């Protein structure tokens, strides 16, 4: 029986990770749960993020997943090690894969990170990078305008270019970095704009691509890669507006999503579960 | 106590993997064993390669290693799954990391592989790549002149360029690949020549870089990354000529190697061990 990979996110950002999982692991079935109703997690307290994340995890554990991907930087920063200790299946976050790819790429150990204010303030990237190599210098920049812009469907054209140029200005002025991590799962949608603004000498790392690649390794390591050749039918769940979710997913994916359902994670509202 | 990473190879090729391990994981101590005396493994029988590889593994297990890297494509092809089943520590080969990086990179699923005749004939790369995604097309090319040339110290200049150009010609003529895997641990030494010959539209994947990055993940996954900040003193062992080994290592590394010893793996010759 096909055992799926579970992907959780505070909203739609994790769809960029899912897109990469589908591309790099086309035999694997995904079950995606986006807590769109309570998105964003960035400004919420650590305790609240942990509670919400555990609710998502419990929901997906009921779907017999073989691997859990926490496709949200905030949830990764607050819950990853706790989840890794508690669950019997492997758990992957989105911070370490991007960090390892940046270490591999950087020749001068000058690495930039852009993300939400929550992610930048958490110091999760500098801590991970310097934990491996204390000589690495990290320049972080919060880009609070990117997520709302992308969720509004603005990810090309003059307006998007202007926002990207203006936002990244401080990073361009002060840094000799050769590598820039997109430390938010929304940002791969505007990767081309970021690359154009930063210039060809800077390698832009998308955590979605790197997370999918590491998922491939962890599944191979546990001998649990899908062996058959049955085209998987992925399942998507959202706690928020179904049509808004479908609209964004279909903009980002090559093919329209087939299975999409609304789900409640609020114990008080879903007595039937 | 510092617990080292063990690296085994049939000769000096695995030094390119070691160089990347030092760069990406500067806190980790390495113990390298190159079976230079019996190199190359490529033309040997599967049974012989397995016996020699197990001799190297047993030697390194006595050094309290926490992770074993089989930095030799032939040994990986013949022994990896056996070692992974038998040993209590994680074991990483050099084939899968390059394959996963190629899958991540390739947009058109047309992937090239160059390696020794043994590696190309083993079909290890096509099997790994197609196991993950059967739509991937693989063009393999054996490059038997590369290893002897590199071991002779010829890895730049007109002669090297001519050999590379002539050898790669068949691959350039027949393929639409966007990604090329250097499927031999010697080849990173001539990566720039290969890149120049193939052109900027082809991403050249070095299995050394990718193996080091996956080693980083596996150590993190097992919570066994080195935590201290003591500069490690790496140890190198060769079954062959010490001065030849030192000469090559010092050409390839940024700093001269400090600890290098001769060792015999032949049970009949080393009664003292």
Image (cartoon, coloured by chain):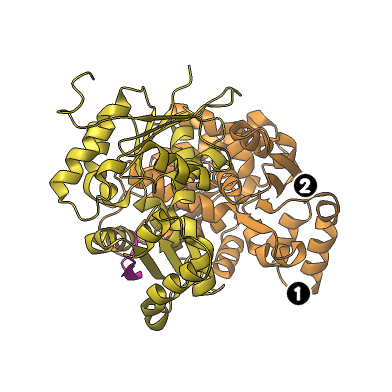
Chain colours: A yellow, B orange
Mark 1 packing: few (<14 Cα in 10 Å), some, or many (20+)?
A: few
**The magenta stretch spans which residues?**
A130-143
Q: Earlier in the sequence, mark 2 or mark 1?
A: 2
**Residue B134 numbered tag:** none
Task: Tell me: A94 left or right of B182.
Answer: left
Q: Does residue A138 appear in the picture of this structure?
A: yes
Q: Give the residue at x 31% y 22%.
A: A62
Residue A204 in the image: above or below residue A264 = below
As drawn, the residue found furthest toward the top would be A1
Q: Chain of mark 1?
A: B
The residue tagged with tag 2: helix, strand or loop?
strand
CA distance for labels 2 and 1: 22 Å
Q: Chain of mark 2?
A: B
Q: Is residue A37 magenta?
A: no
- If the image is split into quadrants, where does the C terminus of chain B sit? top left
As drawn, the residue found furthest toward the bottom would be A173
């Amino acid at each position: 029986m096909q055992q799926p990979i579970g992907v959780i996110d505070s909203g739609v950002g994790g769809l960029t990770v899912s897109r990469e999982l589908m591309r790099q692991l086309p035999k694997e079935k995904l079950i995606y749960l986006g807590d769109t109703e309570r998105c964003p997690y960035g400004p919420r307290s650590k305790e609240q993020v942990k509670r919400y994340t555990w609710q998502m995890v419990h929901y997906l554990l009921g779907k017999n997943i073989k691997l859990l991907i926490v496709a949200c930087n905030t949830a990764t920063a607050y819950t990853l090690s706790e989840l890794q200790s508690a669950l019997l299946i492997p758990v992957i976050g989105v911070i370490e894969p991007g960090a390892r790819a940046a270490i591999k790429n950087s020749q001068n150990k000058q690495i930039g990170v852009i993300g939400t204010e929550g992610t930048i303030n958490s110091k999760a990237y500098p801590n991970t990078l310097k934990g491996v190599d204390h000589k690495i210098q990290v320049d972080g920049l919060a880009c609070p305008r990117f997520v709302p812009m992308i969720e509004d469907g603005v990810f090309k054209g003059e307006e998007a270019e202007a926002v990207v140029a203006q936002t990244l200005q401080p990073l361009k002025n002060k840094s000799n970095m050769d590598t820039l991590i997109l430390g938010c799962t929304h940002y791969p949608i505007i990767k081309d704009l970021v690359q154009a603004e930063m210039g060809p000498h800077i390698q832009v790392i998308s955590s979605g691509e790197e997370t999918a690649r590491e998922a491939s390794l962890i599944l191979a390591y546990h001998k649990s890669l899908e062996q058959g050749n049955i085209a998987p039918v992925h399942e998507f769940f959202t706690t928020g507006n179904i049509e808004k979710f479908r609209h964004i997913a279909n903009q980002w994916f090559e093919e329209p999503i087939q299975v999409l359902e609304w789900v409640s994670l609020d114990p008080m509202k879903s007595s039937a579960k």
